Image (tube, helix red, strand yellow):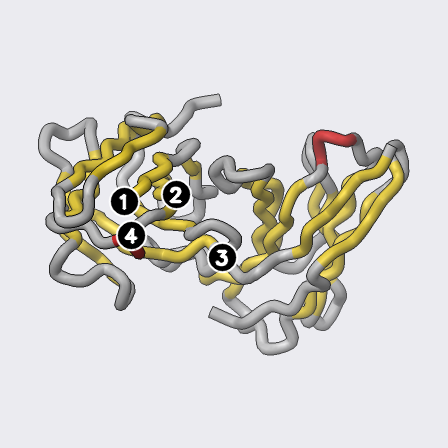
Amino acid sequence: EPEVTQTPSHQVTQMGQEVILRCVPISNHLYFYWYRQILGQKVEFLVSFYNNEISEKSEIFDDQFSVERPDGSNFTLKIRSTKLEDSAMYFCASRGNPNEKLFFGSGTQLSVL
Amino acid sequence: DAKTTQPPSMDCAEGRAANLPCNHSTISGNEYVYWYRQIHSQGPQYIIHGLKNNETNEMASLIITEDRKSSTLILPHATLRDTAVYYCIVRVASGGSEKLVFGKGTKLTVNP
């Protein structure tokens, strides 16, 4: 089965630093998402992306966050100035068409010190 | 999206059927019922989805009541590897980029 690939699997950064989390969605997919999960809590929606623009974003996705699909294959999440509370597992997901199931990557564990 | 209600935890013996209930009493006519699971801290994994009719695939069966206000996910022969958090989600199927909204799910523990 095709896979969504996320790199790195673990990222440690200092508070205030910028981080970029990378994702390679399944090749013919059109809809892309970022979710996060703080340890012990629910999986939370951050943002959805379609046709090179944000479709929807949650209140978590403030001005410190941005997404980009720079080259037609990668889908990135940037946090400009990380805070301690950004420590979480970040999941990328993609789907091919509106009726298709959502495929999730294995996640990037972000630790902000 | 309609809200769902699931028990916080369930136990099942290895080799037996695991029946996970979900209530979605405010579901709309165009909303599908999706089931995903999350093993430890891995990415959520799709299991099955349906609208009105019962569905079966290689992983599980989905039984939806006639009034569509509740459903049951059935893992016919649970194994230790089925220990996970199971999420029942309702979503408009034709919603384009519309997101999945995860609740707290049911923590299923399969015991040897």
Q: Are marks 1 and 3 in contact (CB under 8 Å)?
A: no
* Residue placed furthest toward the top: A1
Answer with left or right where residue B81 lies relative to residue A27.
right
* Spot occupied by residue B92 in the image (x, y as percentages of width and height): 45, 62
Q: CA distance from mark 4 to mark 3?
A: 14 Å
Question: Quick one: A90 or A94, which is closer to the camera?
Answer: A90
- Chain letter of the residue beneath label 4 in the structure image: A
> Which dot marks residue A42?
3
Give the residue number, with chain letter if any, for mark 2: A89
Type of amino acid at the residue the image marks with label 2: Met
Type of amino acid at the residue the image marks with label 1: Val
Q: Are marks 1 and 3 on the same chain?
A: yes
Quarter of the image with the C terminus of chain B in it: top right
Which type of secondary structure does the marked residue at label 1 adopt?
A: strand
Q: Are marks 2 and 1 on the same chain?
A: yes
Whichever of labels 4 and 3 marks the residue nearer the N terminus, that label is 3
Q: Are marks 2 and 4 on the same chain?
A: yes
* Spot occupied by residue B64 in the image (x, y as percentages of width and height): 72, 59
Question: Quick one: A83 or B79, which is closer to the camera?
Answer: A83
> Which dot marks residue B102?
none
Whichever of labels 4 and 1 marks the residue nearer the N terminus, that label is 4
Q: Nearer the viewer, mark 1 or mark 3?
A: 1
Which type of secondary structure does the marked residue at label 3 adopt?
A: loop
Picture mark count: 4
Type of amino acid at the residue the image marks with label 4: Asp
Give the residue number, with chain letter if any, for mark 4: A86
Answer with left or right where residue B85 lies relative to residue B82.
left
